[in-house]
Amino acid sequence: MENITLKTDNNAPQNAPHDSFQDTLYNAPHSEELYESPEYARTSLAASISLGMEPGLFARGAGCGCLNILLHYAKGCAARCGYCGLAADRKSESKGSFIRVRWPVYSLESILEKLKDEARPFKRVCVSMVTRPRAMDDCVTVIEAFADRVGLPISALVCPTIMDGEADFLRLKRAGADRVGIAIDVATAPLFEALRGPGVKGPHRWERYLRALDEAVTVFGPYNAGVHLIVGLGETEEEMARFIDRCYKKGALTHLFSFFPEPGSLMENHPRPSIESYRRIQLARHLINESIRESADFTFTESGEIADFGIDISPYIQSGVPFMTSGCPGADGRMACNRPYSNERPSEPIRNYHFIPDADDIENIKSQVIIKTR
């Protein structure tokens, strides 16, 4: 584990709320305090463009395969995760973005009406909680609304801290969710506690999240539960690879994000992981999640970098598939949650390809998968 430095206020009260967000509302000209879930929700900018609610085009023509719905409250999220754009203590002038992009607020009814257009590209809906006491109930309400009116599979991205064990996972399944995701984000217990728990006076606890993963697998079945992980929060490649393997052996797939410093967050000055390191972790995740290799088959340098995968990796690099966005599938079994440009600006090298890499992309990837020597 690398050393990390957080800009934190040790005197800040736990779960302190932040100011209201300042986004433009869809058909909602008044104070955002009046527009909360379940009647209102946020969507990612990519989803908003695909709904026809925001102007914009996608670089290289890639669309948005998953309609991401984020619950919204005037007081925001009560958690204080050091890297997160939703954190309660994020600087007010920086609020309004999350996972690098803006998330506008719309009425749920307006979103459901837009989905009547069969030309919309979505293959799945994902409803995400934030850390608020009523978020569990509101997530069920929103999932039920989509299940009743939209013929798409539905995922729930949950916050175990506010959930009541298997009983709440059963509620989500009965509401209409066929998959569930848990944003554990951090690959080791010490980093989790430092970035999400006591280290930032936050409410989340490592053991609760791991217990929730077991609960999710029990209720939804093996590999219908997913774990979000952010590469570059201070872990080594070895720690990340071993935790990916641990999740897989529990019956959960993993979905990778590359750390992007959110302005105004406690980690706004923390460096992004090198693209070479991210490529090695992507390849490790693919080999593990496809039951091709285990982390025990890998060798690592003394500093924890992957030195060998225990297999000829050339065919996997040539396919390009390990370097595509990892997320929940649509009804056709193909990846739906492609999150366009959530890890980088369109002008930068693509970290998660939200489309099949072409021949030029593959050549770029080959130059980026640099295997360290022992």
Image (cartoon, rainbow, N blue to C red):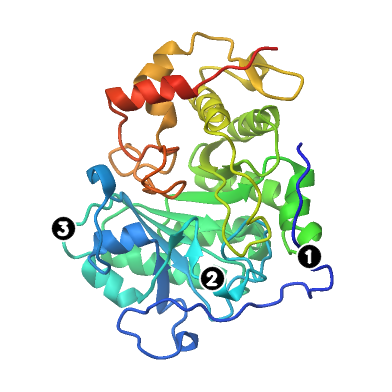
**Few, some or many residues within 10 Å of mark 3 (<14, 14–19, 20+):** few
**Dot 2: within a 10 Å radius of its alpha carbon, few (fewer than 14), some, or many (20 or more) residues?**
many
Q: x, y (%) of residue 139?
A: 48, 67
Element type where label 1 sits in the image: loop
Q: Is residue 119 visible?
A: yes
Identify the mark nearer the N-term, 2 or 3.
2
Q: What residue is disc 3 on?
A: 118
* Residue depicted at x 51% and y 46%: 220
The residue that label 2 is drawn on is 95
Secondary structure beneath label 2: loop
Circle 3/circle 1 CB separation < 8 Å: no
Q: Position of residue 226 (x, y in %)?
A: 52, 43
In this picture, residue 118 sits left or right of residue 302? left
Instruction: Compare marks 2 and 1 and give the one earlier in the sequence.
Output: 2
Image quadrant where residue 83 sits: bottom right
- On screen, residue 371 versus residue 208, left or right, reads left
**What element does badge 3 sit on?**
loop
Residue 201, numbered label: 1
Amino acid type shown at disc 1: Lys
- Residue found at x 27% / y 51%: 58
